[in-house]
């Protein structure tokens, strides 16, 4: 028996620490052995084998994070959902790595937006399509919005001409509801997973979100409901919630188009003529250009996160934030 009680306690602590270390080492060895037992590729993309059925878990690959959030809400733990583009990357320009391509090629189902949103992924998606991977294309299940007369500043780019198809369908929660309904049906057919209860719940929540955003923007006077954005990303939102699209810094439905001096001069005039209250910049908007237009017109420049998820990864928080920033910016 130790004479010094403190020393005894210290030995006890030491003994405990050593035991914990031993347990950690044993766990690590076990984990390493089980990792070796399964093929390296699929093990990286599948959920941890928490049940005996883990090896039969289907993998759904979603191209883009905002769409991915809704797919995760729909699917829950009924399948493994992998999002290709890291959140915060510009979906109009992101390109997959060799590892990303491997995951895509092994998917049980690929969920894509369509309408050219996945510009840098198109070669890979075509390759997967040719190899017989199953696809779900969100834009095939909504009424596609086309660029209208007087929106933006037509300058000969096919992506910004009147009639160009707008890929930003996630800006309308009612369109997302249609996507959920169609996707649940296809997952049942293709993967044999019944998501009808989850789909019903999610569709109800999207209806409620639509009502909430609609109520929120009602606080804005009609005269203030005018949008100038980084590129033409807010068309579906404008159509659903009653806003006028005045123009965009990059007058295109992608962030990849060129901006000319004459386009910018025309935009400045539109901002002044329409007495627009704020210029909303986005992912892919050149900050110097936005600042210059703001200074020259005396209109404030506000950041709007239209192409990436908030910290909690929720589509619902995403759209609420957008509505709040717009209402605060334009009141
Ligand atoms: Zn965009």
Image (cartoon, rainbow, N blue to C red):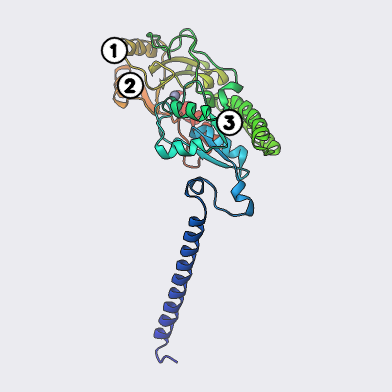
Query: In the image, what residue occupies the spot 43% across and 77% down?
Result: 13
Badge 1 vs badge 3, beta-carbon distance below 8 Å: no
Sooner in the amino-acid sequence: mark 1 or mark 3? 3
Which residue lies under the disc numbered 2?
294
Q: Nearer the viewer, residue 224 or 7?
A: 7
**Local SS, label 1:** helix
Eye-nearest disc, 2 or 3: 3
Which residue lies under the disc numbered 3?
134
Query: In the image, what residue occupies the spot 46% across and 64% down?
Result: 29
Tell me the distance, in whole angstroms, between the alpha carbons under discs 2 and 3: 46 Å
Which residue lies under the disc numbered 1?
261
Where in the figure is residue 68, as x and y percent of width and height? 53, 35
Left or right: residue 4 versus residue 237 is: left
Query: In the image, what residue occupies the spot 64% across and 37% down?
Result: 191
Q: Nearer the viewer, residue 291 or 113?
A: 113
- Assess disc 2: are there few (<14), some (14-19) or many (≥20) residues with their C-alpha within 10 Å of its C-alpha: some
Where in the figure is residue 268, as x and y percent of width and height? 34, 13
Where in the figure is residue 299, as x and y percent of width and height? 36, 21
Where in the figure is residue 119, as x and y percent of width and height? 43, 24
Q: Nearer the viewer, residue 140 or 275?
A: 140
Badge 2 vs badge 3, beta-carbon distance below 8 Å: no
Sooner in the amino-acid sequence: mark 2 or mark 3? 3
């Amino acid at each position: 028996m130790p004479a010094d009680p403190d020393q005894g306690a210290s030995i006890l602590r030491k003994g405990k620490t050593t035991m914990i270390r031993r347990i950690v080492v044993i766990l690590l060895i076990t984990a390493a052995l089980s990792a070796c037992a399964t093929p390296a590729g699929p093990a990286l993309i599948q959920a941890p084998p928490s049940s005996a059925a883990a090896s039969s878990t289907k993998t759904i690959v979603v191209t883009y994070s905002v769409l991915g959030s809704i797919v995760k809400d729909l699917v829950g733990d009924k399948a493994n959902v992998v999002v290709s583009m890291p959140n915060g990357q510009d979906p109009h320009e992101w390109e997959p790595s060799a590892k990303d391509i491997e995951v895509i090629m092994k998917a049980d189902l690929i969920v894509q937006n369509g309408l050219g949103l996945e510009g840098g992924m198109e070669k890979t998606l075509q390759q997967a399509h040719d190899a017989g991977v199953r696809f779900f294309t969100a834009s095939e299940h909504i009424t596609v919005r086309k660029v209208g007369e007087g929106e933006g500043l037509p300058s000969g780019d096919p992506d910004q001409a009147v009639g160009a198809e707008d890929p930003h369908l996630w800006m309308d929660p009612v369109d997302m509801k249609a996507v959920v309904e169609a996707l649940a049906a296809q997952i049942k057919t293709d993967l044999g997973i019944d998501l009808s209860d989850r789909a019903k719940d999610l569709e109800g929540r999207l209806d409620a979100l639509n009502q909430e955003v609609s109520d929120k923007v009602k606080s804005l006077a009609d005269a203030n409901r005018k949008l100038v954005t980084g590129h033409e990303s807010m068309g579906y939102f404008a159509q659903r919630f009653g806003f006028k699209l005045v123009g965009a810094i990059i007058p295109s439905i992608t962030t990849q188009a060129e901006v000319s001096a004459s386009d910018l001069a025309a935009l400045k005039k539109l901002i002044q003529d329409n007495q627009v209250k704020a210029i909303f910049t986005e992912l892919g908007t050149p900050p110097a250009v936005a600042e210059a237009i703001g200074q020259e017109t005396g209109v404030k420049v506000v950041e709007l996160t239209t192409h990436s998820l908030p910290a909690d990864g929720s589509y619902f928080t995403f759209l609420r934030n957008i509505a709040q920033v717009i209402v605060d910016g334009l009141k």
